[in-house]
Image (spheres, rainbow, N blue to C red):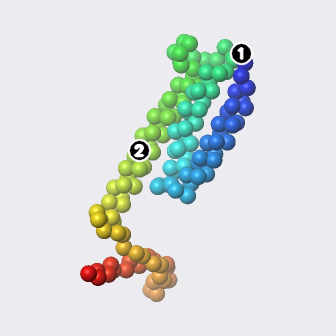
């Protein structure tokens, strides 16, 4: 039976767009949203390839892995390595600023009179016992 794969893909990409839209303000590092797309799209593409009705498409492994699925696997692996690396880098970068058991210091923005640039000023913690 033939399936309307283009409609399936349109619906799946609309859901993916909504997920990426939700992720954007919550991202942990630059490029996370794009890498998330490159992580999820190959999965969608590989699933949709199974429903295609054309028999004249290329296969890397006859009858098992199509060319599009092979490319999807490569893109998925690359995105997974990059997103894992990005999250690890963010965790390492934040480690010196967060002390276990203590809340982070409050900061405010102020204007540096010598340069005229806006800078973050960290206030000292008040220790009232």
Which residue is under mark 1? Answer: 1
The quarter of the displayed image where residue 93 is located? bottom left
Q: Position of residue 49 (x, y in %)?
A: 62, 24
Q: Is residue 73 above or below residue 26?
A: above
Tell me which residue sits at (61%, 17%) in the image.
58
Q: Position of residue 80 (x, y in %)?
A: 45, 39
Tell me which residue sits at (44%, 43%) in the image.
82
Q: Is residue 48 above or below residue 109?
A: above
Describe residue 113's horizontal placement relative to residue 7 as left or right. left
Q: Position of residue 112 (x, y in %)?
A: 45, 83
Q: Earlier in the sequence, mark 1 or mark 2?
A: 1
Which residue is under mark 2? Answer: 84
* Image quadrant where one finds the N terminus: top right
The quarter of the displayed image where residue 4 is located? top right
Q: CA distance from mark 1 to mark 2?
A: 40 Å
* Image quadrant where one finds the C terminus: bottom left
Describe residue 76's horizontal placement relative to residue 57 as left or right. left
């Amino acid at each position: 039976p033939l399936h309307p794969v283009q409609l399936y893909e349109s619906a799946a990409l609309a859901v993916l767009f909504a997920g990426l839209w939700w992720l954007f303000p919550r991202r942990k590092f630059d490029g996370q949203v794009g890498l998330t797309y490159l992580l999820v799209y190959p999965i969608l593409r590989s699933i949709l390839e199974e429903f295609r009705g054309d028999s004249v498409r290329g296969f890397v492994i006859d009858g098992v892995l199509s060319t599009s699925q092979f490319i999807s696997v490569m893109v998925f692996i690359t995105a997974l390595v990059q997103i894992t690396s990005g999250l690890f880098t963010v965790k390492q970068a934040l480690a010196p600023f967060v002390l276990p058991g203590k809340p982070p210091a409050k900061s405010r923005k102020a204007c540096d009179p010598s340069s005229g640039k806006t800078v973050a000023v960290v206030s000292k913690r008040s220790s009232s016992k």
